[in-house]
Image: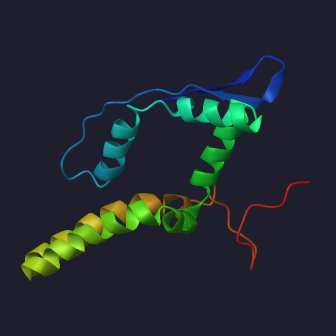
Amino acid sequence: MAETAPRPGQDDDPVLRLERWKGDWPPDDPHANFKSEVELYGLLDPLVTLRGMSAELDIPVGAIASYVLARWATGGSGGLLELGPEMVPRLWEPIAAAEAADSDELRLAAYHQLRQMISWLKVPLDDPEVYPSQSPGESSPPARP
């Protein structure tokens, strides 16, 4: 597990160690899809992109990384809309296969596959410590001071 620790002299700025992960999980693990992606995306070095953005935009790498993590982690259902070009086809695939086969058994299997895929998307929506309730009409993080 990645550890966070304050940097000397900057107690409010956590330090995060990025790490690759290769896990083993049972075939019926309800989080298998997410775990598979963590393992797969762990093969990439996100700092290549963040360093390029940092140089181009004159924003520290850590500030961009914090933005990316906060934006993704607090996106809730908005994250699904933003990931639409990638996620919607992935969600539709088991449905299309079941309908093409005209099989109730495959429809039920598609339901279970979709339930697993969607369950990790809604985790922050179900946990008030991760994604606090918003005031009525509030749809984004509070404005900067």
Quadrant of the rendered structure where residue 40 is?
top left
Quadrant of the rendered structure where residue 57 is?
top right
On the rendered structure, is 87 left or right of 111? Answer: right
Could you tell me how many numbered marks the image carries?
A: 0
On the rendered structure, is 96 left or right of 100? Answer: right
Q: Residue at x 17, y 69 (%)?
A: 109
On the rendered structure, is 32 left or right of 75? Answer: left
Provide residue 31's location: percent of width, then percent of height.
33, 52
On the rendered structure, is 8 left or right of 72? Answer: right
Q: Nearer the viewer, residue 140 or 96?
A: 96
Spot the residue most to the right: 145
Quadrant of the rendered structure where residue 3 is?
top right
Q: Residue at x 71, y 69 (%)?
A: 134
2 versus 132 height, above or below: above
Provide residue 68's location: percent of width, then percent of height.
62, 46
Asked whether residue 115 appears in the rendered view, the answer is no
Q: Residue at x 76, y 35 (%)?
A: 59
Q: Nearer the viewer, residue 99 or 10?
A: 99
129 versus 47 height, above or below: below
* Quadrant of the frame with the C terminus: bottom right
